[in-house]
Amino acid sequence: MKARLASTLLVLGSLMAAQPVLAGSTDMTVWKSPWCGCCEAWSEAMRAAGYTVRTENREDLAPIKAKAGVPAGMEGCHTAMIDGYFLEGHVPLSSVQRLLSERPAVAGLAVPGMPSGSLGMGEDPAARYDVHYVNSNGSTGIFEEIGAR
């Protein structure tokens, strides 16, 4: 009996340890093109990480991006909102988790364009791209460098 209890507790502990620790809200809305497979892959990766993702398909994302405060030079292929922040494009899970953990005074994060190897854009261990922070006044900077330099 004690051996079975210990075994069960060990399995439960392992399962709990495998779950990501999420800070802040886990509810996310993603606005994307109805025909974009990479946006769907990104959304699925967020779901797999424990976020509750609601997707809204739109043919014209420009009004969503403008309302969120995404500068034209920082645009990616989809826009998400979580806990008062925007996530523009293929922002990696590590950056989302850091953003929600540290809660910096920024409007959001952006990965401009569609970098090969970014989350949702195929697996490429050699991928290199930058995750930018965007301030409410539109100024930007580097939040995280992804990949070897």
Image (cartoon, rainbow, N blue to C red):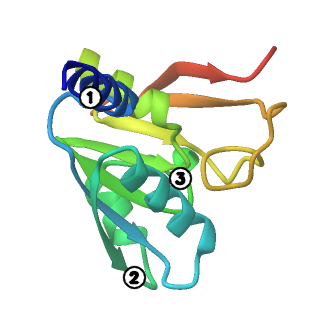
The mark closer to the camera, 3 or 2, is 2
Q: Residue at x 39, y 45 (%)?
A: 87
The mark closer to the camera, 2 or 1, is 1
Q: Nearer the viewer, residue 149 or 17?
A: 17
Q: Quadrant of the N terminus?
A: top left
Give amino acid for label 2: Arg
Is disc 3 surrounded by few (<14), some (14 to 19) or many (20+) residues within 10 Å? some
Q: CA distance from mark 1 to mark 3?
A: 53 Å
Check disc 2 and report the residue beneath it.
58
Check disc 1 and report the residue beneath it.
4
Q: Earlier in the sequence, mark 3 or mark 2?
A: 2
Q: Is residue 146 above or below residue 118?
A: above
Q: Earlier in the sequence, mark 1 or mark 3?
A: 1
* CB atoms of marks 2 and 1 within 8 Å: no
The mark closer to the camera, 1 or 3, is 1
Q: Residue at x 56, y 48 (%)?
A: 90
Residue 104 visible in the snapshot:
no
